[in-house]
Amino acid sequence: MAVPFRKVSKTRKRMRRAHNALTAKTVTSCPNCGEMIKPHRVCKHCGYYKKEEIISKDAK
């Protein structure tokens, strides 16, 4: 069975795991209604994208 020849130091171990950090989801506000949405997506709340209505939402 393979066994490491030397102990992996704390620094070496932490350098290897440095890229494993979590990142927050990117959200922007809709310029039409102000709802928080993912960038470059049609707003689910009002149906607008880049100040243009893509999906018509009927007023209830």
Image: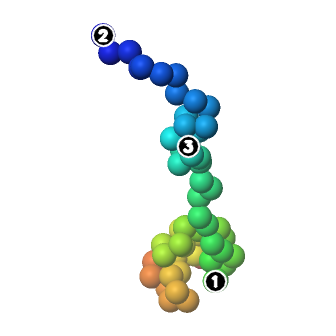
SS under mark 3: helix
Q: Quadrant of the C terminus?
A: bottom right
Above or below, 12 relative to 54: above
Q: Around disc 1, counting alpha carbons within 10 Å, would you say few (fewer than 14), some (14 to 19), or many (20 or more)? A: some
Name the residue furthest bottom: 51
Q: Amino acid at mark 2?
A: Met
Query: How far is mark 1 from mark 3, CA to CA?
Result: 44 Å
Query: How far is mark 2 from mark 3, CA to CA?
Result: 26 Å
Q: What residue is pinned by disc 2?
A: 1
- Residue located at (62% from left, 77% from top): 30
Whether residues under marks 1 and 3 lie with C-beta atoms below 8 angstroms apart, the answer is no
Q: What residue is pinned by disc 1?
A: 32
Count of picture labels:
3
Q: What residue is pinned by disc 3?
A: 15
- Residue located at (61% from left, 66% from top): 27
User: Of the residues under marks 1 and 3, which one precedes in the sequence?
Assistant: 3
Above or below, 46 relative to 19: below
**Residue 48 screen position, x and y as percent:** 53, 81
